Amino acid sequence: MAEKFLMRFLLDMPLFFDTNILMKRPIYLDFNATTPMDPLVLDAMLPYLKDEFGNASSNSHEYGWEASRAVSNSRKSIAEKLGALSKEIIFTSGATESNNLAILGVMHNFRNHRSHIITSEVEHKAVLDVVKSLEAWGVEVTYLKVDKYGRVSPADVGRAIKPHTRLISIMTANNEIGTINPIKEIAELAKHHGVFFHTDAAQAFGKVPLDVKNMAIDMLSISGHKIYGPKGVGVLYVRSQKPQVHLHPQQFGGGQEWGLRPGTLNVPGIVGIAKAIDLMFSNHETDSTHLLKLQKKMIETVLQKVNGSLLNGHPEERIYNNVSFSFPNLSADMFSLGLNGLAVSSGSACSSAEARPSYVLTAIGHSDALARATLRVGLGRTTTDEEVDICITKILQLSKKSQEIGH
Ligand SMILES: Cc1ncc(COP(=O)(O)O)c(C=O)c1O
């Protein structure tokens, strides 16, 4: 049956096949996976890849002084954006490492005590796999369920807190469905109970207002490549006062970053992430207005014109650059065949029908089949109206075709 359907579909392929695709690369609509570097970020980095190549730890000559100055200026600039102090900014290799350092670093303090962590079922693997590794050491973990929009309820967090809860780690916004969590309320609950609060803000940072002091956030992870900065660089904010967070390093060596993250500093990367953050703030008005408009157009048109289509994630509490649809009347095979020319993301780990469906989509109540029939469209600073129109048209054509062949 499946083969018969595929044959019929392949025979009809020319209808879908835009000959321009042979000449052009697909339209990039996967900005939740990664972003291209902003040219201004590259400009800011270039001197540190060329003439200013010094080691920021070399304190006896001007090459080192210049590198060290660049790192200090970057740290200061990032701290200001977060409402933090310079010494609270630790440079890492990305959000994965920031999450590891935050979670393992705090939990090390309690290694000889009964301990409990609260997180959610829909966190990125860079949190889930870290807490899972702690379970092997006897740490108890509560994986909170989310509502149908993928949101964590502060009341559930409150109910899950135990006398030996040490850490709560809840993402600011979800990478698959874009839902924003009520971070301020959760952080305040944690503070009230004397529990540390960490948030993975890889997807939300620069899009959602995040003031670490006013929001009682103790640790926050940022990734360079999600915000038009370079890959391989990230930030971990670590509160230094009231309460001070003591982290135990996970790597050992030259003592850089107050011994928390030793290793020669990635000066071009650090300058790049600082510039990228700067641009996220200075472009915020323009980016959010532009992308909210495109997001609204895509959501409204598809929901209205594709029978049965569902928007995943919260309708309002979502980051401005994420759209995720599930199509109960389409099969995952149709996507791989019908959306050529678009670089978008599907609801399973790979495009094969055998691949495991996304745990985020099953956590919001989707069946395996519906989770597979899911498309994530990530919009970006450079996305045009025309690109969104092409994407919408392709989705509509696909749905029409699917109806015609009675799938
Ligand atoms: C929510 C979230 N956390 C963590 C990560 C990992 O970030 P990085 O690639 O900087 O290690 C990602 C990236 O996919 C993400 O979306």
Image (cartoon, rainbow, N blue to C red):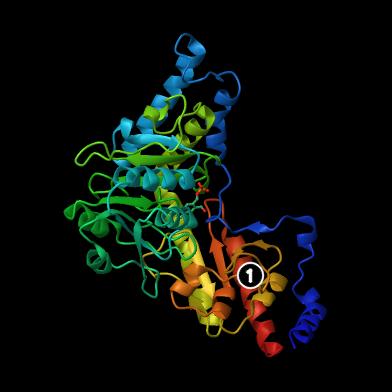
Residue 222 in picture, x, y percent from top left: 43, 45
Q: Is residue 297 visible?
A: no
Q: Is residue 50 visible?
A: yes
Mark 1 lies on residue: 355
In the rendered image of this protein, does residue 24 appear above or below residue 94? below
Q: Quadrant location of the C terminus? A: bottom right
Task: Please tell me whether mark 1 sits on a helix, a strand or a loop.
Answer: loop
Q: Residue 243: name its quadrant.
A: top left
Q: Quadrant location of the N terminus? A: bottom right
Q: Residue at x 56, y 23 (%)?
A: 47
Around disc 1, counting alpha carbons within 10 Å, would you say few (fewer than 14), some (14 to 19), or many (20 or more)?
few
Number of marks in picture: 1
Q: Is mark 1 within 8 Å of ligand 1?
A: no
Q: Residue at x 39, y 46 (%)?
A: 104
In the displayed structure, does residue 273 sit left or right of residue 15? left
Which of 124 and 345 lies nearest the eye of the viewer? 124
Which of 331 and 129 lies nearest the eye of the viewer? 129
Identify residue type, mark 1.
Ala
Q: Residue 178: name its quadrant.
A: bottom left
Residue 263 in picture, x, y percent from top left: 49, 28
Q: Residue at x 36, y 38 (%)?
A: 248
In the displayed structure, does residue 114 sit left or right of residue 376? left
Residue 217 in picture, x, y percent from top left: 28, 48
Q: Residue at x 78, y 75 (%)?
A: 13
In the rendered image of this protein, does residue 55 appear above or below residue 3? above
Residue 155 in picture, x, y percent from top left: 24, 68
Residue situated furthest left in the rendering:
192
Residue situated furthest bottom in the rendering:
406
